[in-house]
Image (cartoon, helix red, strand yellow):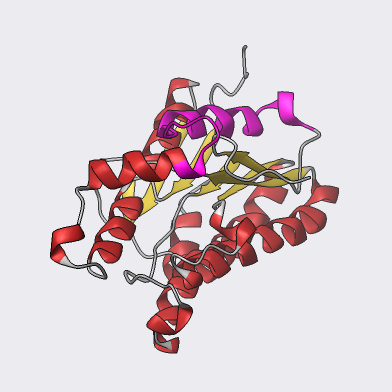
Amino acid sequence: MNLNLEGQSVAVFGAARGIGRAIAEGFVAEGCVVRGFDREKTADFVTEGDVASYEGVKSFAGEFERVDHVVFCVGIGSGKFGFPFWNLEPSDWARVLEVNLIGAVNVAHAFAPKLIESGGGSMLFLVSVAGQMGSQTDPPYSASKAALINFTQCAAKDLGPHNVRVNALAPGMVKTELNHSIWAAGQKKVPESERRSFDEWAAEKIKKVSHLGRWQMPEEYAAMATFLASDHAKNITGQTINIDGGQVMHA
C-alpha cells in the first residue's frame, strides 16, 4: 500500500527508544522528514527536553516551518506496585500525570496552530489498554492514560473543522522499559524464594492477558501510526485503536 507520505514533516515525542523510536523510523521509511523529542539525545534527529515543560515544547515547535503530523509516544509509571492503590502515596501521582497527561496537552497546545496553518494533518497519542480497563498494577499510569483517551476525543472535535484528525493508539503487552519496570516493582513485593526472572514473568503474563498468547512488537505500532497519518485514514478521527492481541474487547 502506497501511503503517499513522502516529504511530509513529522514530530515524534518519545523518539529515543522503544515504540517511539520504531514510529520515528517508520515515518522515515515512508520518506518523511522526522524530528524527535525526548529526555535523552540518542540520535542526531532527537532534541533533548521534557514534555512537562511547556516552554521547552513550544520552543521545539517553533523550529518547524511546517508540520503535517505529530505523535506523542511518552509514558512513565509511578515505579511502584500499585495494588491495592493505597500501596502508593498521593504524592506518587503528580509526576505521572504531569508527563503522561499534561505533557500531551502541552504538545497539543504547541502544535495545533502549526497543523491548522498547514491546512490539515494528524495528531496521534499513544495511550494504553490500562486506560480502558482500570488496571490495578499502576493506578496513576492507568488513570493518566484514561484521561488522555478522553482528551483525544476533545481535541478531535475541536480540530476536525480544520481538517486535522486526532486519534489514540493503545499498546497492549510490549517488551519495553516500562513493562520491565512493572515486573521489577512487582518482584519487590514477593518473597525472594518466589521471585521470577523477567522472561518467566513475561511468558506467564502474556498467556493470561492475550487471547493470541503473544507479545506485540514496536514495529506494529509504527505501521499503524503511518497508516493513520495517511489519506487512507482520512475519515478516522477521535478513535482509540488497540493493538493488544485481544486483551481488551468491547462488547
Q: Quadrant of residue 23?
A: top left
Residue 185 in sight from this viewpoint: yes
Q: Is residue 217 magenta?
A: yes
Seen as rendered, the residue at the extreme front is 193
- Count of numbered tags: 0
Q: Quadrant of residue 4?
A: top right
Q: Nearer the viewer, residue 43 or 189?
A: 189
- Residue 48: x and y in percent read 30, 57
Q: Is residue 26 above or below residue 16?
A: above
Residue 62 in sight from this viewpoint: no
Seen as rendered, the residue at the extreme bottom is 90
**Placement of the C terminus among the 4 image quadrants:** top right
- Residue 184: x and y in percent read 24, 60
**Placement of the N terminus among the 4 image quadrants:** top right
Q: Nearer the viewer, residue 95 or 211?
A: 211
Q: Is residue 91 above or below residue 68?
A: below
Q: Residue at x 50, y 55 (%)?
A: 61
Q: Nearer the viewer, residue 162 or 245?
A: 245
- Write the start and end of the magenta stretch as one range: 208-234
Q: Is residue 160 left or right of residue 54?
A: right
- Residue 161: x and y in percent read 85, 49
Seen as rendered, the residue at the extreme right is 161
Q: Is residue 232 left or right of residue 130?
A: right
- Residue 166: x and y in percent read 70, 48
Q: Main secondary structure of the magenta part?
A: helix
Q: Quadrant of residue 219?
A: top left
Seen as rendered, the residue at the extreme left is 193
Q: Residue at x 77, y 37 (%)?
A: 236
Q: Is residue 51 above or below residue 8?
A: below
Q: Is residue 20 magenta?
A: no
